[in-house]
């Protein structure tokens, strides 16, 4: 379950950002997650609860912002959103697509108390 190691990395980011003594706890973390990031959401939620125990983020809400898959179509020369890496262009039906996004994963922001 690589979601556990993902949450451990997020914990390090959160702890660094919340290291100030005037921050008692983290109440919410917003994570941008691309369609092709290869993360199973149920496993991520489970790992979040386990990994955040004992940290300033214990009991916090993990809010996931879904980002679409994106590609450049060489047939119609347009940037398009795709649901599958091997899908044809939704505009022209062409098959020459270069993936440009959808595998992102980053902490967007967090709420603290």
Image (cartoon, helix red, strand yellow):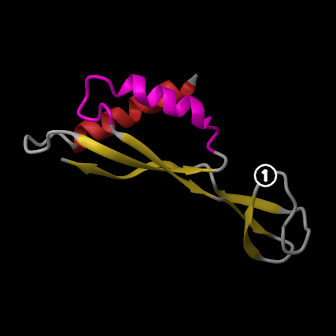
Asked whether, in this view, residue 18 is left or right of residue 22, the answer is right
Residue 2 percent coordinates (x, y): 56, 26
Q: Residues within 10 Å of mark 1 (few under 14, many from 20)?
A: few
Give above or below for 59 relative to 99.
Answer: above
Residue 40 within the segment the image draws in magenta: yes
Q: Which residues are magenta?
A: 37-59
Asked whether, in this view, residue 79 is left or right of residue 96, the answer is left
Q: Secondary structure at mark 1?
A: loop
Give above or below for 93 relative to 40.
Answer: below
Where on the picture, by quarter, is residue 51? top left
Residue 88 percent coordinates (x, y): 87, 61
Asked whether, in this view, residue 103 is left or right of residue 6, the answer is right
Residue 91 within the segment the image draws in magenta: no
Give above or below for 40 relative to 113.
Answer: above
Q: Residue at x 49, y 25 (%)?
A: 4
Q: Residue at x 28, y 51 (%)?
A: 111
Q: Residue at x 67, y 47 (%)?
A: 36
Asked whether, in this view, residue 107 is left or right of residue 57, the answer is right
Q: Looking at the rendering, in which quadrant would you find the N terminus?
A: top right
Q: Residue at x 20, y 42 (%)?
A: 18
Give above or below for 3 relative to 75.
Answer: above
Residue 45 percent coordinates (x, y): 50, 33
Residue furthest to the left in view is 21
Total marks in image: 1
As rendered, which of 16 and 28 lies closer to the eye? 28
Residue 34 percent coordinates (x, y): 59, 51
Residue at numbered disc 1: 84
């Amino acid at each position: 379950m690589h979601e556990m190691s993902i949450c451990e990395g997020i914990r390090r980011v959160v702890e660094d950002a919340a290291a100030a003594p005037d921050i008692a706890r983290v109440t919410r973390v917003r994570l941008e997650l691309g369609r092709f990031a290869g993360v199973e959401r149920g496993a991520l939620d489970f790992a979040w609860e386990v990994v955040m125990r004992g940290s300033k983020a214990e009991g916090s809400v993990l809010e996931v912002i879904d980002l679409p898959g994106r590609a450049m179509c060489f047939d119609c020369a347009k940037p398009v959103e795709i649901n599958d890496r091997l899908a044809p262009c939704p505009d022209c039906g062409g098959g020459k697509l270069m993936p440009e996004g959808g595998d992102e994963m980053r902490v967007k922001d967090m709420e603290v108390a």
